Image (cartoon, rainbow, N blue to C red):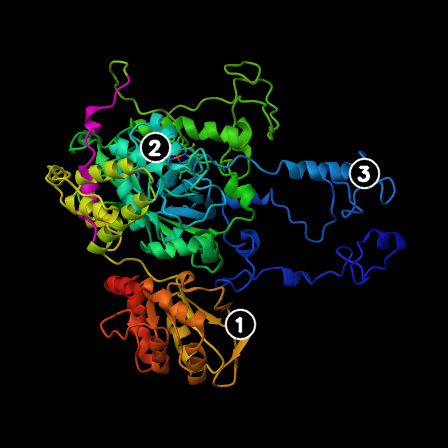
Amino acid sequence: MKKKTQQMQDRLAPFPDGKEAEPHYTDTIDPELIKPTPKPTPPNAEPSAPGSMKMPENTSEKIKDLDTMRDNGMGKPLTTNLGVKIADDQNTLKAGSRGPSLLEDFHFLEKMAHFDQERIPERVVHARGSGAHGYFQVYKSLSKYTKAAFLQDPSEKTPVFVRFSNVQGFRGSPDTVRDIRGFATKFYTREGNYDLVGNDTPVFFIQDSIKFPDFIHAVKPEPHNEMPQGQTAHDSFWDYVSLQPETLHNVMWLMSDRGIPRSYRTIEGFGIHTYKLVNEDGKSTFVRFHWKPVYGKKSLIWDEAQDLTGRDPDFHRKDLWQSIEGGDYPEFELGLQIIPEEDLDKFDFDILDATKLIPEALVPVEIVGKMVLNRNPDNFFAETEQVAFCPANIVPGIDFSDDPLLQGRIFSYSDTQRHRLGGANFTEIPINRPVCPFHNNQRDGFHRMQIDTAPANYNPNSIGDNWPRETPEAAEDGGFTTTPERVEGIKERLRSPSFAEYYSHPRLFWMSQTPVEQEHIINAFGFELSKVTRPYIRERVVDLLTRIDPDLAGGVARNLGIELTREQLSRELPKPVCGLEKDPALSLYAKPDGNLKGMRVSLLVADGVSLKSVEEICDALHKEGVHPQIIAAHMGTVKTEEGEDLLVDGSLAANLSVLFDSVIVPEGAQSIQTLLTDGDAKYHLRQAYRHLKAIGLPGDAREMLQAASLPDDMDDAGLLTPKDTKALMKPFITAMKQHRTWAREHKALDFGA
Ligand code: HDE
């Protein structure tokens, strides 16, 4: 420690016990202790670290570009923004130690003024979100469809930055509310940035972009009291829905379990609109983009989702961060639905209508590549908050269609970014700038970073030999040209009659759900509409539902105490979409998919737990990529039956079962005796039971059934009480793969756990 001078001592604030605070000039901590290990870390095992320190090997052209901007003050002197070293950062400059502060305190002025201006406007929608870096690779060349450079070479990795988001809530709103999730991907290609700005549903609420401000006003918290936060369960949203039947299809998706995903890793993503791909011969094809999660599709249970908003408002954000930190890199396969141009009018709906999906049963999704998210950002604000996506960011080989919703988006995004990020130069912010060179005659504006040295800043020019010059269109490396298309029509504000049918797609969605999912949809409508205070809005929504399906409408009506008329119950139902009654691809659970990687299991323990049992459990779970976590009444360690110290990962009070995918009570007579009388442990099990999770109670742990007042149910495939741990693990993993024990749902509710 450095020797303190009297002057330095005077600067320190006295502690009540007479000792001094010593916030600065202290001993140096060994830098090795501060550095995180550049290897996977299981959830909660150590403080999370910036991507550049944690995953230095996961790099890319974009990461290298960002590296030039990174600053880490470790071992460096504290300075002003202009590099002057600071001797005292604890006290303002005063006239005497009790005197007024002085205006010449340039360090204070700079520090405070910068702090005062730290906030920028949050996104008007999708304010709440989380991002990650990664890469994308095609499985095979897509030259047949497109000349886009990043879709040609299977050996080429294109850097990406992805931001997942909620739509309605503010920046600090909880993750697990019922909402649509945004799924925006920026590909830093060598021909410029390409943004695929999608959602986790394949359709949108409205058909024409001019309606977007109204729709968003209706769904956001109400204007008089700014309530509720991040939820659709309020009058203005349902008022809008009841007056706009085109919203119904997306509303059905929202009311399904898709509205409450388990994690960002387990959602599908959709570009929604029909776009065009253009190949080197100039031939264009219509396309719809899909992201399929390699981890499978998984959602929460509504009761669990609501609990989580309080227990862990960052549940999705944390899952994404910790998965990457732990090496369980989220992966998504890119899928294309290709529609030849001549098939534009082949369907009994309009493929330019964003409220309609193209059933996979009619046009299969061709899987063409994979995206891996393998690195966390270093700084939330610099990267995740400042990233600016825009559907207008396209590259040669990709083009827009005439979808009137897409056309409006082409304007809105960069417009809002100029406001949100403070002017026209937001594309120069490190996370936004491309990895390929860019030159043009755009100049000046707030915070211009680039120093343009060209002698002429206009085109054409002879002073600078007309540089930078245009690049003609070409099969490869050419300039962007819009696909030529013959357009004629009368100038008028009209919706195409081909957009006019609103009920057959919601019906297809409804018919494609498993009975469990149908019940969840009915309950979700019931829950949401029960929060609507105006009865006529509830009635109008139910009336719309009678046009989709009588069972759906009947179920919701019962929940709301509404009696349907004979006329409402005998409405002619919409025709099947292109003759299709169902499409299992629309269901979350019709076919269990994905793997268990990154899922979490709590192991409830106390002193006397069997280490052998714990190890058997952990070995079996680790093989599946699942993270077991030791949960006990207190932090620190518990003494095992074998006399070893077992490290505790979390306390029972702070780790409710909603934070885990499944739970096991390992063997060990003394441990179980303690847990039998532990209220938190019993609540943990009851809640896991209610949320249909796999529960393992091997050997003596079976006694927990009675203690936690759980039914002794031999038929429950997810409630396992085998003779020992060895016999537990196989059926337990099978039960986890089912995601939930759906057959238990009614019992769990009747049981009132
Ligand atoms: Fe957006 N949307 N949107 N949207 N959207 C924004 O842009 C807009 C739509 C989507 O993580 C805003 O930078 C209009 C469909 C995502 O940063 C804004 C219309 C789809 C994100 C905007 C739509 C989306 C946004 C707000 C109707 C799925 C978050 C902040 C014409 C295909 C991106 C911003 C991120 C963000 C406008 C409809 C997805 C205001 C006008 C359809 C994932 O520009």
Query: How far, Cα to Cα, is label 2 from label 1?
Result: 59 Å
| Marker disc for residue 101 | 3
User: Is residue 293 or residue 500 the one in the foreground?
Assistant: 500
**Whether label 2 touches label 1, CB < 8 Å:** no
From the viewer's perspective, tell me whether residue 21 is left or right of residue 334.
right
Q: Quadrant of residue 403?
A: top left
**Residue at the spot 38% in from the left edge and 38% down from the top edge:** 196
The percent coordinates of residue 232 (x first, y second) are: 36, 42
Question: Is 519 located above or below residue 692 in the figure?
Answer: above
2 vs 1, front mark: 1
Secondary structure category for the residue under label 3 = loop
| Residue type at numbered disc 1 | His
The mark nearer the N terminus, 2 or 1, is 2
Secondary structure category for the residue under label 1 = loop
| Residue type at numbered disc 2 | Gly
| Residue type at numbered disc 3 | Ser
| Marker disc for residue 397 | 2
**Callout 2 environment at 10 Å: few (<14), some (14 to 19), or many (20+)?**
many
Question: Is 578 located above or below residue 455 in the figure?
Answer: below
The mark nearer the N terminus, 3 or 2, is 3
Q: Residue furthest right?
A: 6
The percent coordinates of residue 59 (x first, y second) are: 51, 50
| Marker disc for residue 634 | 1
**Whether label 3 touches label 2, CB < 8 Å:** no
The percent coordinates of residue 185 (x first, y second) are: 41, 41
Magenta part of the chain: 493-514
Magenta stretch holds residue 150: no
Q: Quadrant of residue 499?
A: top left
**Residue at the spot 78% in from the left edge and 59% down from the top edge:** 15
From the viewer's perspective, tell me whether residue 27 is left or right of residue 133.
right
* The N terminus: image quadrant: bottom right
The percent coordinates of residue 496 (x first, y second) are: 22, 24
